[in-house]
Image (cartoon, helix red, strand yellow):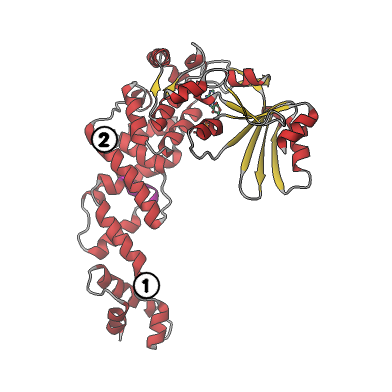
Amino acid sequence: IIGKIAKENGYRVYLVGGIVRDFILSKKSLDIDIIVEGDIEKIIKDYVKNRKISVYFFKEFMTATLKLENGIKFDFATARKESYEYPGAYPKVEKATIFEDLYRRDFTINTLAIEITEDRFGTLIDFFDGLKDIKEKRIKVLHQTSFIEDPIRILRALRFAGRFGYKLEKNTEKLLKLAVEEKLLQKAPTGRINLELNLTFDEENVLYILNLMDEYKVLRQIFPNCFINLEREVIIAKISEAINIYKVLFDLKIEKNSNYLMALMYHLPFDVSYFVLKKYHFDKSIKHFKYIFDFIDKFKNLPEKNIEFFKFLKTIPVEILPFSAIYFNFFEKSIEILKKEKEFKNIISGEDLKNIGIKPSPIYKKILSEIFKLYLDGKISSKKDAVDYVK
Ligand code: ATP
């Protein structure tokens, strides 16, 4: 439909970026980015007419976001070119052709487009040999000054290389190393570094990407004195696993960034971590770091009794449970206890106490916590045991 409207108005529209790359790689992509050579307002107004769609226009950026009722989101942008006032700055934008729009992009694998204008629907546009680079598994910049214009691309290059298991193309690798030597990342806005690091921590292959960042000496430019040794490698791998397990089993609201940041900086004095976290706007993580440092004795002397361990577990902010559990060696125990907590709902409840004939009162809480303690110790293991015990 969008293609039809575009044609009627004499415009051209294209799917671009991650969605095209991921389509070629047969991977799922959540973002649908559409570039319009023409007036996006006109296209969108025609498209949403008589449809239940929310539209958000960002006129100064020449973009708009559409949200369909089924949750699908389209990001529209007018084809544009960008210029950077200084390395890493947020770009200034002006209208341009699709070629110019694709030419401003970071790597060839992200320059593919599929035209969706009616009559040309499905035409693959590949000005910069992106398809070949996808096939040959390489990350390649479009021009010699790419990392100078936008040093954030250093982080993006390593993130994509890590995500897809691609290599940096020879010249790109040389340019990246030069940009790192010149410490260009230090000129990039810290807010953009924050965004990139968060995206990295959200990746499946975090450890691999951090290893690449270490190998290319990028990690130590952001985190002082930070390198990936064997001990840290093991901790990071275990944290990734713990994050997944806690999420799948208990749906805990974990803050990935605090956990990985802690893994990268736990060996540093708090003041140093504080400085880095503040600089890159990880304000919430400061609270988490402080918690671990303040209660370090508690973590070093874990309670032996199950019920005491349960109480201790409940005092830890869930956001940083993975790091805490891995670093202080109580991951298995925490899973065992949390599973028991979850199962306990099927062992006994207020309803059971009522059926036994006990009138609802504050005593319920006392009875249930007494039985919970016995359940944690394995002294009660079924509803029958619990009801008999209460009787
Ligand atoms: P992801 O799968 O991580 O979302 P993506 O390719 O969709 O990957 P986005 O960060 O959403 O990445 O960016 C969308 C597109 O915008 C990219 O495909 C790329 O072409 C372009 N882009 C993003 N950041 C930059 C940058 N710093 N320099 C040049 N082009 C960029």
Considering the image in quadrants, where does the C terminus appear?
Answer: bottom left
- Give percent across and percent down for residue 270: 32, 36
- Which part of the image, by quadrant, shows the N terminus? top right
**Toward the viewer: 356 or 95?**
95
Write the start and end of the magenta stretch as one range. 317-323
Few, some or many C-alpha atoms within 10 Å of disc 1 (few <14, some 14-19, many ≥20)?
A: few
Residue at 61% in and 48% down: 71
Instruction: Name the N-terminal-most of marks 1 and 2.
Output: 2
For the question of whether residue 251 can be seen, the reply is yes
What's the residue at 25%, 50% (across, down)? 299
Q: Position of residue 358 (x, y in %)?
A: 39, 86
- Give the vertical position of 176 relative to 335 (above or below): above
Q: Residue furthest top?
A: 144
Q: Which residue is mark 2?
A: 232
Q: Nearer the viewer, residue 48 or 354?
A: 48
Q: Quadrant of residue 222?
A: top left
The residue depicted at 26 percent of the width and 60 percent of the height is 309
Name the residue located 39 percent from the left edge and 57 percent from the top edge. 250
Q: Is residue 56 left or right of residue 368?
A: right
Is residue 320 covered in magenta? yes
Query: Relative to residue 16, is residue 48 drawn left or right?
Result: right
Residue 346 - label: 1
